[in-house]
Image: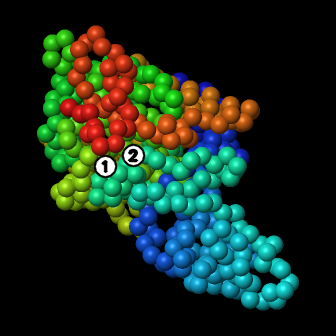
Amino acid sequence: MLRKEVNDLLTQTDPGTTMGEMFRQYWIPALLARELPEDDCPPVRVKLLGERLIAFRDSKGRYGLMDEFCAHRGVSLWFGRNEEGGLRCPYHGWKYDVNGQCIEVPSEPEESGFCEKIKLKAYPLIKVGDVLWTHMGDKENRPPEPEWEFATVPEDQTYTSKRWQECNWLQAMEGGIDSSHVSFLHSGGLKSDPLFKGAKGNQYNANDKKPVFEVTESDGGLFIGARRMAEEGHYYWRITPWVMPSFTMVPPRGDHPVHGHFWVPIDDYNCWAWSFDYHPTRPLTPEELQAMKDGYGVHNKYESEDSFRPLQNKDNDYLMDRAAQKSGESYSGIWGIAMQDASLQESMGPVVDRTRENLVSTDNGIIMARHRLRKAAIALRDKGVQPPGRTTEHQMVRSAAKVLPDDQPFKDAMAEDLTVRPGVKQTSV
């Protein structure tokens, strides 16, 4: 179990909190690029780390992310007019550029210099891959731009989605590094989901429901290894990389695309679950891409495209099908691997009370991740030490699945497999 004060430290990310300040040291996903599809398109509300923001794309294609509210009398700039190089408040015409600088106040003479004194809090917003990223910390400590493999392969090799998840970021992320549940919760999906089925590794998952976990530290986080029995004298290894604070990758299956996630706090009670699929060496097929858009794999169907809330949600009990659960068609009765995870994580409540949990050996990855997060957040707060996971080198990781002789440690035998190698296919079973 975890002490309450530690649970609070890890789960609270508003401005001024210990974990919130650590999150602000990273480039984090803010929007899908398709949410701002063209110059002078409508602005979009964004809430990250407890801050209400507005994003827009100006007449020259520049992206902006700034305080949602006009500095005059607090009107939401979501109602603003995106025109002629800035976002204009419709109430009294105050206008802001992509840096949050006020560039026009119609009621004041230009020579007064009043505009120069008005500036909204603003953050950089850059496009890498099909994602718009922001850094909400000090400019002086800004890390290099993100170079995750899914965001840097050719456009036809990758697909990204996001969903609103109604729980704290940490319990969602902890689900992403817990592969022991796959043999139970996702057992039906491994047989039927087009983005998972057919891989030989599924047989190992089904035949051994008691994986042994070995967790090793990496420079940027952890490698979480789940070991299952394979043929005589061999183990089937599935290695999940976790890079601080909230990047995870699902070990691959066959030649299917590689999946992964970012878990980004909206506030203490909600998070964005970002999901990506990519293939390192080939374009996604039309069938794979359609399956992702239809909610298979790590993606989901939406109740509303504007809200990114899943069609299956807590208000409709995730459309649970008890008949499918009873027949074994679906282990949990919930359709889709993404919503199987989300439904159970949300069922814990907005912020799970970790003082009541009872952890076991398969939770070692979660235990070590909590320890590294706490240690890094306190080192930043007390000593100004920048946390791991911010550099390009820390982002050059892959998940992998492999059958090894039972006397070979995965960290030594799979070192190359767990590293990005451009033009080389993922290691999979």
Q: Would you call the spot at circle 2 few (<14 residues within 10 Å), some (14-19), or many (20 or more)? A: many
Residue at coordinates 29% horizontally, 43% vertically from top-left?
423
What separation in Å lies between label 1 and label 2 (alpha carbons)? Answer: 8 Å
Q: Position of residue 82 (x, y in %)?
A: 56, 81
Badge 1 amino acid: Tyr
Instruction: Give the residue pinned by disc 1.
Output: 278
| Residue 277 versus residue 91 in the image, above or below | above
Horizontal relation, residue 82 to residue 186: left or right: right
Residue at coordinates 37% horizontally, 38% vertically from top-left?
420
Towards the viewer: 299 or 66: 66
Towards the viewer: 363 or 408: 408
Q: Is residue 291 visible?
A: no
Contact, CB < 8 Å: mark 1 with mark 2? yes
Circle number at residue 6: none
Q: Position of residue 199 (x, y in %)?
A: 16, 36
Horizontal relation, residue 164 to residue 158: left or right: right
Q: Secondary structure at mark 2?
A: helix
Q: Quadrant of residue 17?
A: top right
Residue at coordinates 70% horizontally, 63% vertically from top-left?
121
Q: Nearer the viewer, mark 1 or mark 2?
A: 2
Q: Secondary structure at mark 1?
A: strand
Q: Is residue 201 visible?
A: yes
Badge 2 amino acid: Glu
Horizontal relation, residue 122 to residue 227: left or right: right
Q: Quadrant of residue 172?
A: top left
Instruction: Give the residue pinned by disc 2.
Output: 149
